[in-house]
Amino acid sequence: MVIPAYNEEARLPQTLARVCAYLAQARPEPGEVLVVDDGSRDGTVRVAEAFAQTHPAVRVIRNDHRGKGYAVRAGMLAARGRTVLFTDADLSAPIEDIELLLPWFERGYDIVIGSRMGGGADLQRVRAPLLRRVMGRAFNWIVRLLAVHGIHDTQCGFKAFRDDVTRDVFTRLQLYGDHAPRVRGGMMTAFDVEVLFVGRKLGYHIREVPVHWSYGRGTKIHLVLDSWRNFRDVVLVRWNDLCGRYRTPAP
């Protein structure tokens, strides 16, 4: 499990305790938890490393502050499991909902993603404010039109990949790869769109699965700036594809 974290000192200890309890009690196979710090300015690294001292399954990766997309990519490429999942530090989707995703790998899917929309997901969601929901649906309509057809919710932070697929997809990403610049403050991007676009371009089978969802009150999203970044990212994904930049893995 990969958990990107930016200024999550308050929530992270409880999140790690819940994740490790789930691994110990519900999963027969060994697992690991990678906390990828995104250049936090609070005590995120301190509490994560303190927790790791008594929980061998937990590893901490320190990064400069380059945004969630860069942090997720770093964690996914460092992970060693047969199945690799990334999830948000606030556990907006409960970690136990992994059980909804994993059976689809046995049915031949390569990428299985949580969804907050479609297929009954709305009935399982503690709803965000109306403006957030309207903007989210508008953005997903743009994504389906320009980049990833047939997926209701590209932005849900609960996605799992087969290990070989993880490396094949994440080494090809362009928007928030090795050359991503340092940023200031919280930043939401459409890195998920690039991940799913590349996965589909490579021919991998993607399954969208409704999950339970609770709106995180501690969100760091700026509606205007982040909406612009998301739209820009979708356009850049199409441009990168036209330029042939997804054909071979990045060096």
Image: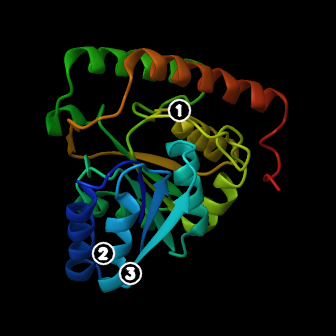
- The 10 Å Cα crowd at callout 1, few under 14, some 14 to 19, many 20 or more, is many
- Residue under the image location 36 percent in, 52 percent down: 42
Q: Are marks 3 and 1 in contact (CB under 8 Å)?
A: no
The foreground one among 111 and 138 is 138
- Residue under the image location 28 percent in, 76 percent down: 23
Which numbered disc, 3 or 2, marks the residue that appears first in the sequence? 2
Q: Secondary structure at mark 3?
A: loop
Can residue 217 be seen by looking at this rendering?
Answer: yes
Q: Quadrant of the C terminus?
A: bottom right
- Residue under the image location 50 percent in, 57 percent down: 109
- Residue under the image location 55 percent in, 23 percent down: 229
Q: Are marks 2 and 1 in contact (CB under 8 Å)?
A: no
Q: Secondary structure at mark 1?
A: loop
- The 10 Å Cα crowd at callout 2, few under 14, some 14 to 19, many 20 or more, is some
Which numbered disc, 3 or 1, marks the residue that appears first in the sequence? 3
Q: CA distance from mark 2 to mark 1?
A: 31 Å
Badge count: 3
Residue 76 falls in image quadrant: bottom right
161 to 130, vertically: above or below: below
Residue mark closest to the camera, 3 vs 1: 3
Q: Which residue is mark 3?
A: 57
Name the kind of residue labelled 3 in the image. Ala
63 to 146, vertically: above or below: below
Q: CA distance from mark 3 to mark 1?
A: 30 Å
Q: Which label was assigned to residue 219?
A: none
Residue mark closest to the camera, 3 vs 2: 2
Q: Which residue is mark 1?
A: 190
Q: Position of residue 220 (x, y in %)?
A: 34, 33
Q: Which residue is mark 2?
A: 51
